[in-house]
Amino acid sequence: MNSTVLSSCVLLLGVIAIILLPQGALAQSEMMMTRPQAGVEEHRLASLEELSRTADLIFVGDCSEVKSAWNPTRTMIFTTVTHQVDGDFVFKGSPAGVHTFLRPGGQVDNIKTVVSDQPSYAPGDRALLFLYQPSRVKLYGTVGGSMGKVPIVRDPKSEQEVVRLWTIRDKPGKYYSAAPSGGVQIMVPLTELKQLIADWVGQNEVR
């Protein structure tokens, strides 16, 4: 299914097939969220700087709850995702201490819907999130699709929180959350990344 770019972040409910499979098998359907013309398209590799400049909301969050349910007409599954926002790492926007948003897709019993090129969430995940402004029904989309959720891990040697990023030798200073062709993976401390994002979005926007 080809991606369609519209002037606002809306949900495209074109053709969605939801199939009930026997014996608990998972049925999957694919759908898409459109992106603003000035945004970052999912199929194109974008640098972390592009994600930072495009996003409306950037923060580090600890996922505490993921709950899927049918909409009132039982035509689509939506998932409510709750994060505990780390106040030391709010890079852009003003999220509340507990940030809850709605995303299309999810699993209820033996039916599962999958949004094309969007990240998954699970309780216990700690990640750096790049989000678009929500739609009228509080639907949030990650900038650049799956590139907009960057897992945070702890380096066993330094015990620092780090982010696994990618760089390209002939493009110094460019960092990517997905692997580019010929890319080299590096570990960037979260505190160092905070300063980089501050430079990209403007120091006055980073707490």
Image (tube, rainbow, N blue to C red):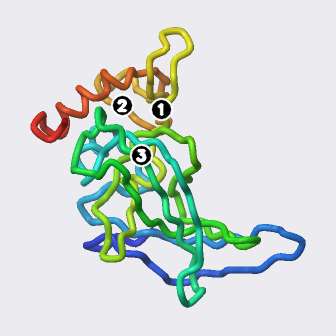
Q: Quadrant of the N terminus?
A: bottom right
For label 3, the SS is: strand
Discs 1, 3 touching: Cβ within 8 Å: no
In the depicted view, which residue is nearer to us: 123 or 37?
123
Please identify the quarter of the rendering in which residue 76 is found.
bottom right
Above or below, 129 against 38 in this view is: above
Q: Amino acid at mark 2?
A: Tyr
Horizontal and vertical percent position of residue 145: 44, 55
Name the outermost residue toward the left.
204
For label 1, the SS is: strand
For label 2, the SS is: strand
**Residue 55 visible in rendering:** no
Q: Which residue is mark 2?
A: 175
Please identify the quarter of the rendering in which residue 134 is found.
bottom left
Q: Quadrant of the C terminus?
A: top left
Label 1 or label 3, whichever comes before in sequence order: 3
Please identify the quarter of the rendering in which residue 36 is found.
bottom left
Q: Which residue is mark 1?
A: 152
Name the outermost residue toward the bottom.
73
The residue drawn where x is 31% and y is 27% is: 193
